[in-house]
Image (cartoon, rainbow, N blue to C red):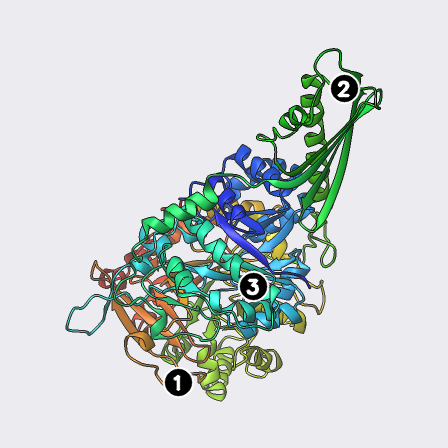
């Protein structure tokens, strides 16, 4: 039976040593760049190399977090950063950025690719796609149930690494822009300021009571170990690279204990002792714990509504953990045999126990001499052979056999020679163990897509036509308002309308009628169905809605779909969808290599699935965007869309603020949506919309990003094929006024922007 891997966090070298001492099979750590915990101690280059060597000599593994989004100007640093770790046989990398994924797959195929939870893998189709693109393991979204994880493991046939303990993000990881928008510290760059841990007031609550509706309790699943193992999860991951060494070692030791108990007696129930639970609770866990999302989609009892503070930490527990695991390094158990026979070569052998294997090495010295004065005895030989302090080895048994052939003179070997033979033997065994570790590293890309740098350019006829305006509408009133514009002749109409799927599914025939009237007015108008932010396989399998879209999009007048997550991309690729496939800004392409990877999903020129257009991410400045588009154009003329107006979706969460602060709307899995609000400490109201069909919330920025004053400059750049206006929570009148301002090409002078508060987002202010 393949045993589950216990994977522990390490923010520095001391933590790594402690985690391995406590029983971790592998450790994940960050280097000096590209890691999603910028404020952890992290490892410098030489420390990472030492860590890899230390892990391999002890039969352990090291995974590096290369899991931030990488800007185009930074991408050239990646090769030099990764090369020494690849040469040292780094076991794997945990990756968010599609471009980094492609680059490592191409340049360092011997390193395993693990798709980070930041990639927001929510189902089988996304996992299958990642496997095709070179990943051998996925870390699914933490919001998935145990059943969903089992489906990914069996149907996608890819390794699953799942979080079992530690802090929980309120937002689906990878799609959180909250910290980025309010303070310029991007969670996608490892610099989250944790606004979810701050207090908020429910809008309309006259008491003014501050609560913490976005702060989840920490996860603790030690009592679920049998279920998680039997579900087929390959790796148990403990969160916490920014926490102290005692946390990683202490938590690891207790999960190691109960994992081993399960394998020793799999048919017996092993209750978690009160003492062990008290230890876990005293190791940096927030007030109250939960089992995460494994058995529930959301709930008030998962949230630290009153306080997100940590429990008091026991100094006694910390001291005990430190004493047990942090004050010494692992040693490989070995036996040493020494044969000293007169007139024959000295022979010293070592048997080392590495995992379930035993390695044997032998060294030979000069011929043993007869003693001229005092003969050498066993104790003096043992004294020299036991000096293994600076080596990776610890001798359990040392056997010394001295044979003078019956001469009675005894034997003599210089102490310096014994010491040299001991050093030579240790080095030889260490090399053998490291060689064994290296030979176990295989190419991470044994099947799936194998492409070179050349990407077929199916966009050769694409022309940039500055000023084409597209509009996204989120509710029926906005759609009807925009539809009326087609009856007006005094300013230009949208070239494309994105219709939120909630509008379509709530009233398909009525929506189809509106679309037909729009196309009768202006035949060239494209209508694109904007898919949900989240697609999952739960008791409601949301891919059934995707099936309906794929089967009937032409019937209702749609030209294609706006893809918002990997699950949707994988689904429509597998279906061979031939409509337009437009990737939203959440399908991150911060660098040209990311675009190349996404275009590897293309099936071909005629009649096959092809990505039709990409959208610029919301966190790039205009200067970074220009650099990106310039680099993209070296390989392809794929159309590029840029958002000039819209509220940023700062969080997309499985948690429901309405349910937490009040109760469920009762519209679960119906095409139903409601609007509520919370107010922050600066008295900004954050509007929240519910998607009850797929059971998620979207928390919108308090103010829209409005680039009306930059609009002329944006058009004059001549690099964007489409310019997009997103309407989210605006009323119909505001939507019409905003669109009219842009459509008349003079938005900088429009009165509407004097009436609303707005921000310019990351147009000039980049993220760290």
Tell which of 748 and 375 is nearer to you: 375
Residue shown at the point (70%, 40%) measured from the top left: 433
Give the foreground label among 1 and 3: 3
Q: Which residue is painted at 62% across and 35% down in the image?
A: 84
Above/below status of 469 relative to 504: above
- Which label's residue is closer to the chain start, 3 or 2? 3
Q: Which residue is mark 3?
A: 261
Estimate how packed mark 1 is, as few (under 14), some (14 to 19) or many (20 or more) residues with alpha carbons within 10 Å.
some
Query: Which residue is more in the foreground, 621 or 85?
Result: 85
Residue furthest to the top in view is 372
Q: Which mark, by number, is residue 147?
A: none
Residue under numbered circle 2? 411
Q: Is residue 681 above or below residue 417?
A: below
Residue that appears at 42% across and 48% down:
321
Residue highlighted by disc 1? 667
Name the residue at the left extreme.
Answer: 207
Q: What SS does tag 3 mark?
A: helix
Quarter of the image for the C terminus: give it.
top left
Q: CA distance from mark 3 to mark 2?
A: 51 Å
Q: CA distance from mark 1 to mark 3?
A: 44 Å
Q: Earlier in the sequence, mark 1 or mark 3?
A: 3
């Amino acid at each position: 039976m393949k045993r589950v891997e216990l994977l522990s966090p390490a923010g520095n070298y001391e933590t790594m040593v402690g985690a391995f001492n406590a029983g971790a099979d592998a450790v994940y750590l960050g280097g000096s760049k590209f890691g999603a915990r910028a404020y952890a101690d992290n490892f410098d280059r030489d420390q990472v190399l030492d860590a890899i060597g230390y892990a391999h000599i002890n039969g352990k593994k090291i995974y590096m977090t290369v899991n931030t989004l990488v800007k185009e100007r930074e991408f050239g640093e990646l090769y030099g950063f990764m090369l020494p770790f690849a040469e040292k046989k780094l076991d794997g990398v945990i990756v968010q950025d599609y471009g980094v994924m492609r680059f490592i797959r191409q340049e360092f195929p011997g390193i395993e690719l693990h798709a980070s939870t930041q990639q927001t893998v929510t189902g089988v189709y996304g996992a299958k796609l990642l496997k095709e693109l070179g990943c051998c393991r996925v870390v699914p979204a933490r919001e998935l149930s145990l059943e969903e994880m089992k489906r990914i493991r069996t149907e996608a046939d890819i390794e699953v690494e799942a979080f079992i303990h530690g802090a929980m993000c309120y937002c689906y990881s990878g799609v959180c822009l909250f910290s980025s928008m309010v303070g310029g510290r991007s969670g996608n760059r490892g610099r989250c300021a944790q606004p979810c841990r701050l207090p908020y007031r429910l809008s309309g609550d006259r008491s003014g009571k501050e609560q913490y509706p976005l702060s989840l309790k920490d996860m603790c699943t030690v009592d679920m170990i049998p279920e998680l193992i039997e579900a087929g999860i390959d790796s148990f991951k403990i969160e916490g690279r920014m926490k102290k060494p005692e946390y990683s070692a202490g938590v690891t030791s207790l999960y190691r204990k109960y994992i081993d108990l399960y394998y020793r007696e799999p048919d017996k129930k092993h209750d978690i002792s009160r003492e062990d639970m008290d230890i876990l609770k005293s190791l940096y866990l927030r007030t109250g714990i939960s089992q995460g999302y494994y058995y529930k989609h959301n709930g008030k009892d998962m949230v630290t509504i009153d306080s997100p503070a940590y429990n008091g930490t026991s100094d006694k527990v910390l001291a005990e953990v430190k004493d047990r695991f942090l004050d010494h390094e692992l040693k490989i158990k070995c036996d040493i045999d020494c044969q000293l026979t007169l007139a024959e070569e000295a022979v010293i052998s070592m048997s080392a126990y590495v995992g379930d294997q035993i390695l044997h090495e032998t060294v030979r010295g000069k011929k043993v001499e007869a003693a001229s004065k005092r003969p050498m005895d066993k104790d003096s030989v043992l004294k020299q052979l036991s000096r293994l302090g600076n080596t990776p080895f610890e001798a359990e048994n040392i056997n010394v056999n001295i044979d003078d052939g019956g001469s009675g003179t005894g034997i003599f070997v210089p102490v310096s020679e014994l010491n040299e033979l001991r050093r030579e033997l240790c080095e030889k065994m260490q090399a053998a163990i490291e060689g064994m570790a290296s030979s176990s590293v295989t190419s991470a890309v044994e099947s799936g897509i194998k492409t070179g740098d050349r990407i077929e350019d199916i966009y050769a006829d694409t022309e940039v036509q500055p000023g084409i305006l597209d509009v996204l509408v989120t509710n029926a009133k906005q759609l009807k308002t925009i539809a009326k514009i087609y009856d007006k002749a005094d300013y230009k109409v949208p070239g494309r309308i994105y219709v939120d799927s909630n509008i379509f599914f709530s009233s398909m025939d009525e929506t189809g009628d509106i679309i037909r009237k729009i196309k009768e007015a202006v035949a060239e108008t494209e209508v694109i169905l904007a898919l949900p932010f989240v697609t999952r396989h739960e008791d409601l399998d949301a891919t059934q809605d995707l099936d309906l879209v794929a089967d009937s999009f032409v019937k209702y007048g749609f030209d294609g779909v706006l893809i918002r997550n990997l699950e949707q991309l994988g689904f429509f690729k597998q279906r061979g969808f031939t409509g337009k496939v437009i990737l939203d800004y959440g399908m991150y392409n911060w660098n040209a290599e990311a675009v190349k990877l996404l275009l590897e999903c293309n099936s071909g020129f005629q009649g096959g699935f092809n990505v039709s257009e990409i959208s610029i991410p919301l966190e790039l400045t205009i200067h970074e965007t220009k650099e990106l588009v310039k680099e993209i154009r070296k390989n392809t003329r794929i159309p590029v869309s840029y958002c000039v107006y819209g509220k940023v979706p700062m969080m997309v969460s499985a948690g429901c603020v309405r349910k937490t602060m009040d109760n469920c709307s009762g519209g679960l899995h119906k095409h139903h949506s409601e609007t509520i609000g919370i107010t922050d400490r600066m008295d900004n109201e954050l509007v929240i919309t519910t998607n009850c069909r797929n059971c998620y919330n979207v928390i919108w920025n308090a103010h829209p990003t409005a680039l009306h004053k930059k609009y002329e400059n944006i058009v004059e750049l001549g690099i964007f094929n489409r310019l997009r206006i997103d309407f989210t929570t605006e009323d119909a009148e505001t939507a019409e006024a905003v669109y009219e301002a842009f459509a008349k090409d003079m938005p900088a002078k429009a009165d509407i922007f004097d009436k609303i508060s707005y921000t310019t987002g990351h147009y000039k202010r980049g993220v760290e």
